Image: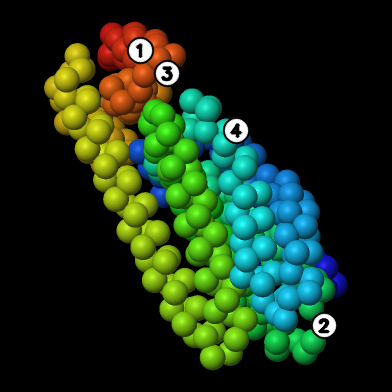
């Protein structure tokens, strides 16, 4: 019975948070299958790699005066944030991963997967009174899993920025994202290691969550400006432009419903591809040029059907 309850208590919050960040990305929603792939890496792959890395780092603290504290504050953040972010270094090459919001979503998915598995392990192995188990569930489901989501989102957003950055700056951006994630993780683990600092930890994660929401909204607003700028230059019916560059595009009735979703997806994708073409170089530039021509052709065919 404890296994089933622990499974529900760990899976339900993670899935709700994942659904929320996926639905919040309204401009260009990410493929749910690709998001789930990142979630699975966090839940399985990152947990295994992180545990192995943490084991080796922790061994170096074996003769320290505070081995448990050093494991929580140093070895776990270093190993686990590396394990979670590792997958992003492979998937960021995908054409599905092409802006900061994508990095926030995919990084968040990995963090939530990792937090879910970690929570399940804590819940199912807890040996104490029911009221303390319930308190553990509330704290880890409301704060710890959010920490994992945000820390890996930071890595994802910096990797997204690095995708369109050349030279040594690319490495600096990725390392800065990883270091920030480690610091967030370490600060949280340190704060919950002592009763005297526990409430500071709750305040820290609450403030961090507010910042995350604001940064997510800023990223979406920046995307909206790109859509407006790039589509206003396109050969699209004026009455459609005014709708496509606003939130009215999500409403029914302004165009044949059978083509509305494809029309929006193609137009918004065209706007982002034009922006990406301007900030990319080499083979990336050739790829986005091809995508621009392809989407213009699709839009031309769609407007011909209206």
Q: Position of residue 83 (x, y in %)?
A: 66, 49
Judge left or right: residue 27 versus residue 88: left
From mark 2 to mark 3, how far is it between C-alphas?
54 Å
Asked whether 38 or 204 is in front, the reply is 204
Q: What is the number of the mark on residue 127?
A: 2
Asked whether 41 or 182 is in front, the reply is 182
From mark 3 to mark 1, how far is it between C-alphas?
9 Å
Label 3 packing within 10 angstroms: few (<14), some (14-19), many (20+): some
Instruction: Tell me the quarter of the picture where residue 257 sits.
Output: top left
Q: What is the number of the mark on residue 284?
A: 3
Q: Residue under label 4, please give it.
A: 90
Please report the residue visible at 60 percent of the width from the left and 54 percent of the height from the top.
81
Q: Work out whether mark 1 precedes mark 4 in sequence or the reverse, and give the earlier one.
A: 4
Quadrant into which the C terminus falls: top left
From mark 1 to mark 4, how far is it between C-alphas?
23 Å
Q: What is the number of the mark on residue 250?
A: none
């Amino acid at each position: 019975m404890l296994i089933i309850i622990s499974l529900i208590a760990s899976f339900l919050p993670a899935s709700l948070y994942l659904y929320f960040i996926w639905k919040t990305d309204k401009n260009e929603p990410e493929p749910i299958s690709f998001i789930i792939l990142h979630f699975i890496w966090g839940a399985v792959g990152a947990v295994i790699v992180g545990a192995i890395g943490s084991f080796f780092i922790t061994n170096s603290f074996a003769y320290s005066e505070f081995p448990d504290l050093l494991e929580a504050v140093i070895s776990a953040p270093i190993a686990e944030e590396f394990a979670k972010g590792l997958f992003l270094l492979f998937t960021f090459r995908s054409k599905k991963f092409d802006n900061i919001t994508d990095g926030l979503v995919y990084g968040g998915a990995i963090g939530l997967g990792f937090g879910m598995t970690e929570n399940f392990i804590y819940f199912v192995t807890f040996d104490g009174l029911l009221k303390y188990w319930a308190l553990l569930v509330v704290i880890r489901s409301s704060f710890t899993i959010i920490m994992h989501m945000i820390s890996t989102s930071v890595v994802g957003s910096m990797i997204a920025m690095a995708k369109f950055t050349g030279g040594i700056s690319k490495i600096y951006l990725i390392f800065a994202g990883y270091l920030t994630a480690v610091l967030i993780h370490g600060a949280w683990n340190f704060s919950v290691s002592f009763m005297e600092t526990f409430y500071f930890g709750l305040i820290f994660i609450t403030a961090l969550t507010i910042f995350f929401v604001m940064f997510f909204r800023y990223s979406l607003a920046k995307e909206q400006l790109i859509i407006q700028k790039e589509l206003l230059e396109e050969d699209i019916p004026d009455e459609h432009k005014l709708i496509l560059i606003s939130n009215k595009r999500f409403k029914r009735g302004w165009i044949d419903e059978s083509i509305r979703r494809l029309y929006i997806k193609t137009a918004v994708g065209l706007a982002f591809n034009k922006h990406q073409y301007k900030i990319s170089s080499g083979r990336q530039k050739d790829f986005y040029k091809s995508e621009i021509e392809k989407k213009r052709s699709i839009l031309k065919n769609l407007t011909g059907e209206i």
